[in-house]
Amino acid sequence: MARKIPQSNWFWYLSGIIFALIGTQFQKGPGYMDSAYYTVGGLQLFEGNGFVEPYIWNYLANPKGLPAPAFVYWMPLPSLLAFMGMWLGRSPDFVWAKLPFLLMAGFLPVLTVYLTRKVITNPAYAWIAGGLAVFPGVYALYLTIPETFIPYMIGGGLFVIIAFFANNQWIGGLESFQRFLLLGFIAGWMHLTRADGLIWLISAFGVVIWRIRPWQSRQKMRVAINGLLALLLGYLILTGGWYYRNWVVFGSMFPPGNGKSLWLTSYNQLFAYPNDHLTFTNWLKAGLPAIIHARLDALSLNLQNFLVVQGSIILVPLILVGCWSKRHHSAVKFETMMWLLILGMMTIVFPFAGSRGGFLHSGAAIQIFFWSMSVAGLEQLIIWMKKARGWGMSTSMTLFGTFLILINLFIAGWFFYQRVYRVPNHLVWNESIERYQRVGERLDDLHISKQFIAMVNNPPGFYWATRRPSIVIPDGDIRHALAAAKRYGATYLLLEENQENLSNLYANPHDMSGVRLLETHEGVHFFLLLPEAEWGWGEISWFKK
């Protein structure tokens, strides 16, 4: 039966597209801040505004004001892809921003099947891994929205395939110039997708040294030097323009301020203003028990993400068996090392960002490999049971492989129902954007000009829904909010229920020094900021004439 499953690339590509297309019908907007950020980045490019942002969502780089330089904390590739979709459709509608990601989703099963054929004993069973990639569990939520998941999955899959498996006339042998050039290009793709993608460039240099072993002879040394130069060339072909932009805008190859994220003692400090306290000295003052506790919490959450998201729970033992059974293969050693490196980085170095989604995003680069290893593990288990119990190989692989695919499909459907649909005739995925749209309509009714700057919880989502500039509500109490408002000229605050640090003000909205309650609409409190005591009402034209 397994051999009757279609194995063509077109079959798998179209299967991935069709499933992604079914889900994307219900996602009418970005849904959460990360996706809104990349979508608005594409919108800015589509509207000819360039690499600038009409909002400030964190203060790490100490921005001078609005508009602010774009992609200071995150990288630009998802926005470039969203822009390409809008450009193709000649429209800024969200459906066009999703188009490149939808088209890329079809490559997940194609690459997974290719890799699985290379690592399992009987390539006929690669269809199981293809099915897992078509119905990718929790990742089904993110297949088509402007985000880093799909670009990172594809980049990670291509990296291991090009580094260890692909072998044709164009790519050449394992030590060919073309192979390393392409590997550098993929590393550039991954770095432009996520800032931590830089580790893939470093690992690519490691692959060159690992495979060639230049210390063994002068000839190998020359090959290694040529390989490293090819790798760097491929990387710079994709990233050179980005580094040039950073040099022109910031006077350095990397944007300023991101180093402060190393010294967070809580996740919400990412939004602190001012953030002069984000230093190594203050980080040490938190105390060793707090530092260790934060990293143990991050480890626990990251391992839970591995169990539920990357391993769909039931795949985890199969992945482990598969990796153990193929442990002598260079690709398995490499991918295991990369996963441990990502886990360590998102646990020890960036515990707060890592446990709040960083590991989920970065770990996506290993996902295609995990799907392949789960089939390798299943194959090994059936081989053992065949020897011990006389199980039929083909029948058992087909039965259990189908069961695994159905489990992945069930997980995808359950999470989709929880995060996207949940309530009959109501799409919870679109709630936040639709609420902002209604808030924007109310601001129009109040004749509050779109030139005035808001202070909100989710600046990218707010801009996508209303086309109004904003800055993020900083961590701390209302005094920190007023300080940021004065610095960046924010004149009104929109306070939502999910604003943890101002929960008392949300529960008991009232006037205070520097803050005046205007009204409550859609569960959002409207406050006017910096009244007469600070600026004088006569200096602010709140309403259009």
Image (spheres, rainbow, N blue to C red):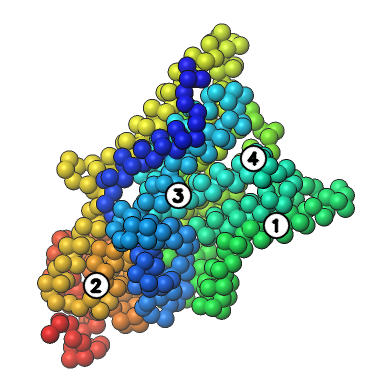
Name the residue nearer the viewer: 453 or 60.
Answer: 453
Disc 4 to disc 1, C-alpha distance = 17 Å
What residue sits right under mark 2 in the picture?
A: 493
The crowd level at tag 4 (other Cα within 10 Å; few <14, some 14-19, many 20+) is: some
Q: Quadrant of the C terminus?
A: bottom left
What residue sits right under mark 4 in the picture?
A: 166
Amino acid type, callout 2: Leu
Disc 3 to disc 2, C-alpha distance = 33 Å
Amino acid type, callout 3: Phe
First reached walking from the N terminus: tag 3 or tag 4:
3
Amino acid type, callout 1: Ala
User: In the rendered image of this protein, does residue 203 appear above or below residue 456?
Assistant: above
Disc nearest the viewer among 3 and 4: 4
* Residue occupying image coordinates x 59% and y 16%: 384
**Residue 115, image x, y percentages:** 57, 35
First reached walking from the N terminus: tag 2 or tag 4:
4
The crowd level at tag 3 (other Cα within 10 Å; few <14, some 14-19, many 20+) is: many
